[in-house]
Amino acid sequence: MSGHSKWSTIKRKKGALDAKRSKIFSKLIKEITVAVKEGGPDPDGNPRLRLAIANAKGQSMPKDNIERAINKGKDKDGASFTEVTYEGYLPHGIAVYVECTTDNLQRTVSNIRAIFNKYGGSLGTNGSLSYLFDRKGVFVVPKGDLDEEEFEMEVIDAGAEDIELDDNFFTITTAMEDFGPMMKKLEELGIEPETAELQRIPKDTKRLDLEEAQKIMKVIDLFEEDDDVQKVFHNLELTDEMIAEM
């Protein structure tokens, strides 16, 4: 299984048991709010909102929470969010790409820089790590009663570059430009993915020993726990040994 697919699997399993579910919900609410401010409250005419709602449902967010987030986005006097990315290195040359949504840029950059500095890393300039990652569409779909061969043929026609089945979930990877067509194909098939998102997939990964890798993953967790952080990507290779420890 490729590294990013392993991480998708780990995050899905962690999410099912995660005591910090409210943290997951707060990130999803922020995404819904931003989507509404950007493209309006009608999911039929706002693909980003439609996707955000689908992801919220995939995380079992109650319908009332989703509706409140949409109403929050419609409030013209509500907080205005800015989307920003930060790039840098952690020890052992591990590249980290952090995507944030914030209403206070000064607070966010201060928090992100503090984590890099405290754990022996360094915050770089925007664009300095872009060449290390490809933007890909990543879909996680429950297998359910789907016929594996038939389903794979359908999604290959829609632009799937990679399809992996693990623990009764398909992980489908597409080129960024095929993200929309894949969403449309799944809708046509009547399939609601558990998650569908654009991820930054490392072109090459770095392998560390277990102890070093665990230290890096603890820092990744610290980034993810920040309220302004939406997603964190990295180029640490996740070995089977590491996954067993997680």
Image: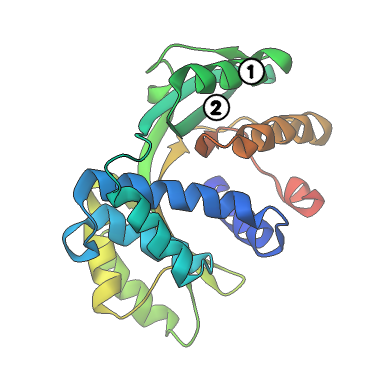
Q: Residue at x 29, y 66 (%)?
A: 156
Residue furthest to the bottom in view is 145
Disc 2 element: strand
Q: Badge 2 is on which residue?
A: 96
Residue 5 image label: none
Image coords of residue 237 (percent x, y): 63, 38
Nearer the camera: disc 1 or disc 2: 1
Give the residue type at disc 1: Phe
Disc 2 marks a residue whose amino acid type is Val
Q: Residue furthest left?
A: 45
Among the two numbered marks 1 and 2 on one chain, the one whose residue lies closer to the N terminus:
2
Q: Is residue 89 left or right of residue 174?
A: right
- Give the answer, above or below, for where 178 lies relative to 125: below
Instruction: Work out whether residue 182 or residue 62 is closer to the camera in this orientation and state it.
Output: 62
- Say which residue label 1 marks: 116
Residue 9 x/y as whole percent: 60, 58
Measuring from the top left, give residue 232's x and y in whole percent.
Answer: 53, 36
SS class, disc 1: helix
CB under 8 Å between discs 1 and 2? yes
In this rendering, position of residue 104 left or right of residue 40 = right
Q: Residues within 10 Å of mark 2 (few under 14, many from 20)?
A: many
